[in-house]
Image (cartoon, rainbow, N blue to C red):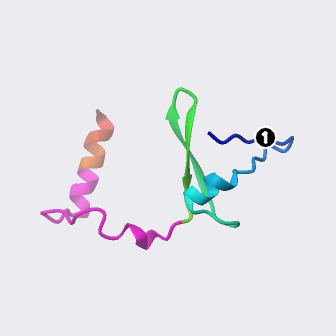
């Protein structure tokens, strides 16, 4: 387990081993994702959006904007 110290300015240096595993370099961005019960996950947020291509299959049926809006409205009423 890696540890770090918070500075008086609220800054934290991410240990080198963690940076290597995340694949982050100086200038890259990271996100702190709340998992609940005071637990956060550190996620590299600097990946190119194009890396996601092909991860989600195309839907069997195209959905219209009107259908999307209707679904959003119906779920907002629940």
Outermost residue to the bottom: 50
Outermost residue to the left: 60
Q: Residue at x 21, y 66 (%)?
A: 58
Q: Decide if residue 60 is on the left or right side of residue 25.
A: left
Q: Decide if residue 49 is on the left or right side of residue 5.
A: left
Q: Decide if residue 41 is on the left or right side of residue 58.
A: right
Q: Is residue 28 above or below residue 31?
A: below
Q: Residue at x 23, y 59 (%)?
A: 66
Q: Is residue 78 above or below residue 12?
A: above
Quadrant where the image shows the N terminus? top right
Q: Which residue is mark 1?
A: 6
Q: Residue at x 33, y 39 (%)?
A: 76
Q: Is residue 48 above or below residue 4?
A: below
Residue range of the region highlighted in magenta in the rendering: 47-70
**Which is nearer the eye, 55 or 76?**
55
**Which is nearer the eye, 68 or 50?**
50
Q: Residue at x 60, y 59 (%)?
A: 20
Q: Quadrant of residue 40?
A: top right
**Which is nearer the eye, 21 or 45?**
21
Q: Is residue 59 magenta?
A: yes
Residue 75 position within the rendered picture, expressed as x and y whole percent measured from the top left: 28, 40
Q: Decide if residue 62 is on the left or right side of residue 27.
A: left
Q: How many marks?
A: 1
Q: Secondary structure at mark 1?
A: loop
Residue 48 position within the rendered picture, expressed as x and y whole percent measured from the top left: 49, 71
């Amino acid at each position: 387990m890696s540890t770090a110290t918070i500075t008086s300015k609220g800054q934290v240096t991410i240990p080198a081993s963690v940076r290597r595993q995340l694949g982050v370099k100086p200038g890259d961005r990271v996100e702190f994702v709340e998992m609940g019960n005071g637990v956060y996950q550190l996620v590299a947020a600097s990946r190119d959006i194009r890396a996601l291509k092909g991860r989600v299959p195309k839907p069997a049926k195209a959905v219209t904007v009107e259908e999307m809006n209707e679904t959003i409205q119906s779920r907002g009423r629940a």
